[in-house]
């Protein structure tokens, strides 16, 4: 089969690692809190079987389901979101992004994005007659 010339080459193998580590983190946090699979699955709107697939890191699971569980358990989503940025930039995923608590880095990214958005909005709304 000939690959379309209109599509970029993509190495998505890093997503397997993201799903594997994410599943382990979800399972470990659920167990730590004493939450049954059925309880979390019901809250997520998925079956217990599907949650087992997520926790096992099955590559066929959807990242939005990993995010759903991660957010409901109060875990940092950085171990999912930040590696995707590296993958989209065609860069190898640093393993530390998968195995480190990234709350501080996550917050710094959100602050950086918010600052950029505020600056852009300010520049957009600033009348031409205002002095710099």
Image (tube, grey):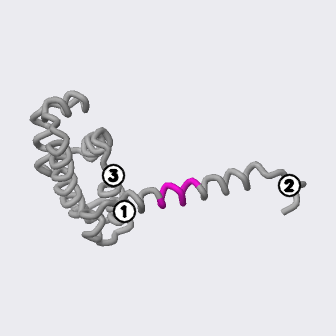
| Up-down relation of residue 48 to residue 90 (above or below) | above
- Work out how far the residue at label 2 is from the one at label 1, CA to CA, in angstroms: 38 Å
Label 3 crowd bin: few (<14), some (14–19), many (20+), radius 10 Å: some
Q: Nearer the viewer, mark 1 or mark 3?
A: 3
The secondary structure that most of the magenta stretch takes on is helix
| C-beta proximity under 8 Å, tags 2 and 3 | no
Residue 28: x and y in percent read: 16, 49
Q: Sequence order check: which comes first, mark 2 or mark 1?
A: 1
- Residue at the front extreme of this rendering: 33
Instruction: Identify the residue position indicated by label 3 in the image.
Output: 76
* Sequence-wise first label, 2 or 3: 3
Percent position (x, y) of residue 88? Answer: 36, 62
Between residue 60 and residue 38, name the one nearer to us: 38
Q: Is residue 5 visible?
A: no
Q: Which residue is mark 2?
A: 128
Which of the marked residues, 1 or 3, is nearer the chain's N terminus?
3
Number of dots carrying numbers = 3
* Picture coordinates of residue 16, whole percent (x, y): 18, 58
The quarter of the picture where residue 10 lies is bottom left
- Quarter of the N terminus within the rendering: bottom left
Q: Looking at this rendering, what residue extends furthest in the right direction?
A: 129
Residue 67 is covered by the magenta coloring? no
Q: CA distance from mark 2 to mark 3?
A: 42 Å
Give the extent of the magenta segment. Answer: 108-114
């Amino acid at each position: 089969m000939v690959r379309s010339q209109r599509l970029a080459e993509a190495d998505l193998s890093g997503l397997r690692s993201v799903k594997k580590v994410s599943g382990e983190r979800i399972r470990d946090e659920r167990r730590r809190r004493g939450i049954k699979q059925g309880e979390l699955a019901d809250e997520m709107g998925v079956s217990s079987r599907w949650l087992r697939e997520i926790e096992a890191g099955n590559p066929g699971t959807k990242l939005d389901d990993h995010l759903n569980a991660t957010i409901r358990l109060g875990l940092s989503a950085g171990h999912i979101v930040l590696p995707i940025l590296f993958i989209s930039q065609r860069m190898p995923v640093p393993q530390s992004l998968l195995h480190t608590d990234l709350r501080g880095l996550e917050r710094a990214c959100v602050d950086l994005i918010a600052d950029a958005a505020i600056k852009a909005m300010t520049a957009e709304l600033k009348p031409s007659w205002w002095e710099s």
